[in-house]
Amino acid sequence: MPTGTVKWFNSTKGYGFIQPENGGPDVFVHISAVERAGLGTLNDGQKVSYEEQRDPKRGKTSAENLKAV
């Protein structure tokens, strides 16, 4: 399971981005994934593990199954 650092997260807008620890493009994270993980919000600089999931309709990748590390 990849790990990364929350680059920024705006709880008002309901999304943000995770910077992967192993490099590569930032990963989009939606508030719904945060809530499903039982987390209230994400804080800038917070370390998390996640799974990347690709939306077949839109072709975009997002973070799911988040865990604080």
Image (cartoon, rainbow, N blue to C red):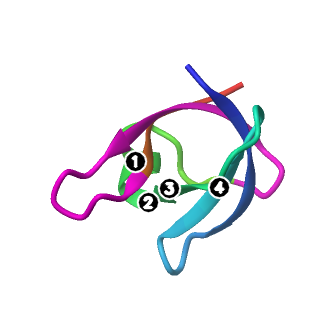
Q: Residue 47: name its quadrant.
A: top right
Q: Mark 2 Cα within 10 Å, few/some/many (few <14, many 20+)?
A: some
Circle on res. 33:
1
As shown in the figure, which amino acid type bears the numbered disc 1? Answer: Ala
Between marks 4 and 2 in the image, the one whose residue lies nearer the viewer: 4
Picture coordinates of residue 32, whole percent (x, y)? 36, 55
Which residue type carries mark 4? Asp
Q: Which mark is residue 26?
A: 4
C-beta proximity under 8 Å, tags 1 and 4: no
Residue identified by numbered label 2:
30
| Amino acid identity at mark 2 | His
Which three-letter amino acid code belongs to the residue tagged 3? Val
| Residue drawn 65% across the image and 55% down it | 26
Q: Is residue 7 above or below residue 34?
A: below
Q: Position of residue 43 (x, y in %)?
A: 74, 55
Q: Which residues are magenta?
A: 43-61
Residue at 44% from the left image edge and 60% from the top image edge: 31
